[in-house]
Amino acid sequence: MDPISVVVTALAAGAAAGLKPAAEQAIKDAYAGLKGLIQRKWGEVSLGQLEANPASEARRTVVKEDLAQTDAGSDRELLAMADKLLEAVSRHAPDIAKNIGVRLEDIKSGGSLRIRGVAGKNLGVDGKKWEVQGDIDISDVGGGATPQNPPLRQ
């Protein structure tokens, strides 16, 4: 997964989990840190609409496009904070990423992983302990597995 996609996925998961009243403090803190860093370094990137509806692919796309216009993809501090937030969500609210359409656990990337067009509600992509050494592209997955269209699992 490219660095900007990791950041946007972390933002969406953090917004979905961290803005709930019963969210773990670790998620709230990690989300606030990531959001604050983005606002300080790239104030032109608006996160308000993503926070209002983190499950919206369109809103995630806008944030991704905005971040792509900056040097955010090479910012090590930003990527470390995004990883910290994803780890907190994975540990304290693992169902959240599922609700926004992607569930990722323990991904280690030696190449690139691109996931596109994933629908939410029922899980569209599920991964545990992925190690990507080359390029993987998963497209137009959709949720709600059927016998003809089982969920993709590794």
Image (tube, grey):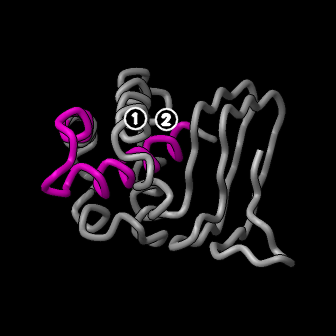
- Residue depicted at 64% across the width and 68% down the height: 117
The secondary element bearing badge 2 is classed as helix
Q: Amino acid at mark 1?
A: Arg
Does the magenta portion include 11? yes
Res. 119 image quadrant: bottom right
Residue at position x 68%, y 28% from top? 109
Residue 104 circle label: none
Residue 145 location, x and y as percent?
71, 73
Where residue 103 appears, as percent x and y from the top left, is 56, 51
User: Camera-side residue: 10 or 78?
Assistant: 10
Give the SS element for disc 1. Answer: helix
Position of 151 relative to 137 (above/below): below
Q: Residue furthest front?
A: 147
Q: Is residue 141 magenta?
A: no
Q: Residue at (76%, 78%) from the top-left corner?
A: 146
Mark 1 sits on what residue? 91
* Image quarter hosting the N terminus: top right
Q: Quadrant of the C terminus?
A: top right
Q: Position of residue 107 (x, y in %)?
A: 63, 32
Three-letter code for the amino acid on which mark 2 is drawn: Gly
Image disc number at residue 73:
2
Mark 2 near mark 1, Cβ–Cβ under 8 Å? no
Pick the residue in front: 15 or 61.
15
Residues shaded magenta: 3-32
Is the residue marked by circle 2 packed among few (<14), some (14-19), or many (20+) residues within 10 Å?
A: some
Badge 1 local density, few (<14 within 10 Å), some, or many (20+)? some
**How many numbered circles does the render carry?**
2
Labels 2, 1: front one:
1
Marks 2 and 1, how far apart in space?
25 Å
Instruction: Mark yes or no: residue 73 visible.
Output: yes
N-terminal-most mark, 2 or 1: 2
